[in-house]
Image: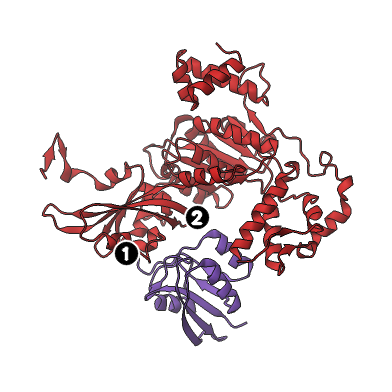
């Protein structure tokens, strides 16, 4: 290979910078199958810092399903072509991610084998779509067929096409995390990283370093540069859960990021740019927090560009039954039991319980019942005693879901001031405005506007006709 | 209560994945945290469900493993089994650290 061609001096290229610009996980592995280096994408997928990965056998970092059975690297020794295989990895957050692995030999200028280059591409999106085709009530791991959920599913695609901040609210256990992941998977950033951080899990100083990173020597113990989650989420999504717990000084920093798409790592006077889309969630009442001056109003406005309120389970009607069947099948398979379903005495108990812990509570109740059940049917005796007590208090015929103590009349979807006269809860009005905005952006070009919205031309024309636009 | 520790193994090292473990090492400890009995078991097939069943049926109190899916991690925790996951290194050295109360989640004995 020539040292220099078209003005590029290959020997002077910073290999890490080159690898970081590749939009998929890349690792350079030695012949001893130990990691030499990896790019930011690989750090985001595996959850491991490259400094920590250096010198460690790759099977402990990539944790691929093929590592101990049919290692793609050793299988590829001596072959000129690269090989691609499907598998899955378990990352540091204990998530199993389906991936496409590609591995090739690395040779030096003399043609000697010096190691391997392995790329990993997250294919969860493809897998989710396959699953969705098989199950019509399954949308990116969210299960539901109630009108409220159907409406959320139909809005998902639209929300995903934009880059606006999304604010998800809902009681605990309603599936805020799943919805954030669904937005990621259905968006154009699906191939980018999805970085989740719980703002309430870390003390303020650690959280700042975790979110925005730090420079070496910024504080005692900062022995090396840390990129921070915002930088790792470049071209992807950063999901800030429990945003209500974000300390006030960091709220200012987040505000600056939302405005300028750049931030200053701790101890640095050089701004770092990141093209990360922000999704935030909380179960707290942010309006109340703003009134109490524990949350900045300007930040709340910036986060609430698109707001989605997940309905509590007790308002989702038949979804309870759908979820019951799903979880019983899931746990029966997990624990290797032959349970077919619920007996007639267990069903009313399950259907009339108010589920203050929502889907998560329902899941736990069924997990408990499946563990306890030695039969092929779950009876009321297998359910926690507090459920049976609840049925005695709330007889089926007297349960009034609207007047239920847990009921809160929240609209499920809001978008902040689309226009002065628009009803913020009217989806038709929102769609109409999106069409008008898209047309304005594309200077009246309908094909361009349809493309902007991620719709087909026929869908666009049908909706234009429906809303009498143009 | 005496402790019983299970390490998922791959050759001489901790197995990288819990669900693909086909060999396990189990050690019973006395009150002085010394190994009084140990055995290595080869599983008939690798499966996270079977491994969970084995952990519970053997009365294991502590599990040391590599990557584990959250579902099984939470299940074992719920069953009051302590789990130290993402552990990297030769299992005998890992056991030594564990006995000395110096092993933590994510301990890396191969690190540079």
The colour one sees for chain B in the rendered image is purple
Residue tagged 1: B112
Letter of the chain shown red in the rendering: A
In this view of the protein, can residue A219 be seen by the observer? no
**Residue name at image x 55 percent, y 43 percent:** A132
Badge 1 crowding class, 10 Å Cα cut-off, few under 14, some 14 to 19, many 20 or more, is few
Q: Nearer the viewer, residue B31 or A306?
A: A306
Residue nearest the observer in this picture, A148 or B59:
A148
Give the label on residue A142, or none. Answer: none
- Drawn side of residue A96 relative to residue A433, left or right: left
Residue A63 in the image: x percent, y percent?
41, 60
User: What residue lies at 59% left-to-right and 49% top-to-bottom?
Assistant: A200
* Viewer-proximal residue among A97 and A13: A97
Front residue of this view, candidates A295 and A438: A438
Q: Is residue A328 left or right of residue A131?
A: right
Task: Output the chain of dot 1.
Answer: B
| Residue occupying the point 68% across, 21% down | A423
Q: Position of residue B50 (x, y in %)?
A: 54, 71
Within 10 Å of disc 2 (Cα), the crowding (few <14, some 14-19, many 20+) is some
With A162 as the anchor, is A359 left or right in this view?
right
Q: Is residue A367 visible?
A: yes
User: In the image, is A179 to the left or to the right of B105?
Assistant: right
> Which image quarter: residue A390?
bottom right
Q: Quadrant of residue A285?
A: top right
Write the residue at 74% across / 49% down: A356
Residue placed under numbered mark 2 in the picture: A95
């Amino acid at each position: 290979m020539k040292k220099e061609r078209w003005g590029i001096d290959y020997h002077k290229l910073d290999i890490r910078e080159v690898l970081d610009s590749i939009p998929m996980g890349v690792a350079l592995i030695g012949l001893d199958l130990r990691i030499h280096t990896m790019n930011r994408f690989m750090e985001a997928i595996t959850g491991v810092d490259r400094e920590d990965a250096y010198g460690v056998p790759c099977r402990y970092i990539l944790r691929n399903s093929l590592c101990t059975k049919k290692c793609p690297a050793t299988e590829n020794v001596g072959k000129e072509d690269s090989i691609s295989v499907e598998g899955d990895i378990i990352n540091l957050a204990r998530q199993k991610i389906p991936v496409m692995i590609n591995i090739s030999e690395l040779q030096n200028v003399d043609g000697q084998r010096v190691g391997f280059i392995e790329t990993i591409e997250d294919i969860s999106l493809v897998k989710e779509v396959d699953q969705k085709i098989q199950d019509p009530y399954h949308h990116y791991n969210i299960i539901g067929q109630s009108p409220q959920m159907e409406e959320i599913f139909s809005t998902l695609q639209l929300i995903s096409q934009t880059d606006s901040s999304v604010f998800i609210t809902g009681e605990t256990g309603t599936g805020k995390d799943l919805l954030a992941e669904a937005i990621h998977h259905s968006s154009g950033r699906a191939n980018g990283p999805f970085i989740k951080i719980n703002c309430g899990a870390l003390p303020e100083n650690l959280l700042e370093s975790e979110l925005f990173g730090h420079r070496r020597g910024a504080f005692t113990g900062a022995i090396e540069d840390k990129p921070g989650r915002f930088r790792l989420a470049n071209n992807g999504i950063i999901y800030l859960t429990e945003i209500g717990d974000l300390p006030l000084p960091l709220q200012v920093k987040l505000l600056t990021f939302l405005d300028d798409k750049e931030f200053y790592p701790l101890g640095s006077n050089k701004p770092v740019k990141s093209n990360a889309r922000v999704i935030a969630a909380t179960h707290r009442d942010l309006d109340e927090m703003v009134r109490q001056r524990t949350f900045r109003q300007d930040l709340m406005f910036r986060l609430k560009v698109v707001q989605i309120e997940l309905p509590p389970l007790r308002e989702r009607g038949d979804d309870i039954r759908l979820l019951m069947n799903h979880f019983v099948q899931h746990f029966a398979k997990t624990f290797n039991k032959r349970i077919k379903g619920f007996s007639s005495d267990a069903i009313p108990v399950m259907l009339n319980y108010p589920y203050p812990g929502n889907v998560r509570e329902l899941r736990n109740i069924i997990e408990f019942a499946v563990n306890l059940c030695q039969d092929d049917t779950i009876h009321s005796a297998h359910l926690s005693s507090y459920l049976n007590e609840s049925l005695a208090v709330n007889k089926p015929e007297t349960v009034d879901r609207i007047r239920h103590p847990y009921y809160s009349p929240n609209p499920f979807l809001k978008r902040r001031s689309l226009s002065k006269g628009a009803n913020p809860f009217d989806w038709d009005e929102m769609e109409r405005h999106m069409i008008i905005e898209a047309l304005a952006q594309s200077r009246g070009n309908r094909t361009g506007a349809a493309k902007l919205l991620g719709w087909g031309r026929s869908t666009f024309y049908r909706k234009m006709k429906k809303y009498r636009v143009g | 209560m005496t402790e019983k520790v299970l390490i998922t193994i791959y050759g001489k090292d901790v197995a990288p994945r819990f669900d693909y473990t086909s060999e396990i090492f189990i050690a019973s400890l006395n009150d002085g945290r010394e190994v009084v009995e140990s055995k290595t078991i080869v599983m008939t097939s690798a499966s996270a469900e079977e491994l969970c069943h084995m952990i519970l049926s053997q009365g294991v109190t502590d599990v040391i493993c590599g990557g584990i899916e959250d579902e099984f991690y939470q299940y074992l925790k719920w069953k009051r089994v302590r789990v130290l996951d993402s552990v990297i290194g030769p299992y005998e050295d890992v056991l030594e650290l564990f006995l000395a109360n110096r092993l933590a989640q994510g301990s890396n004995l191969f690190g540079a």
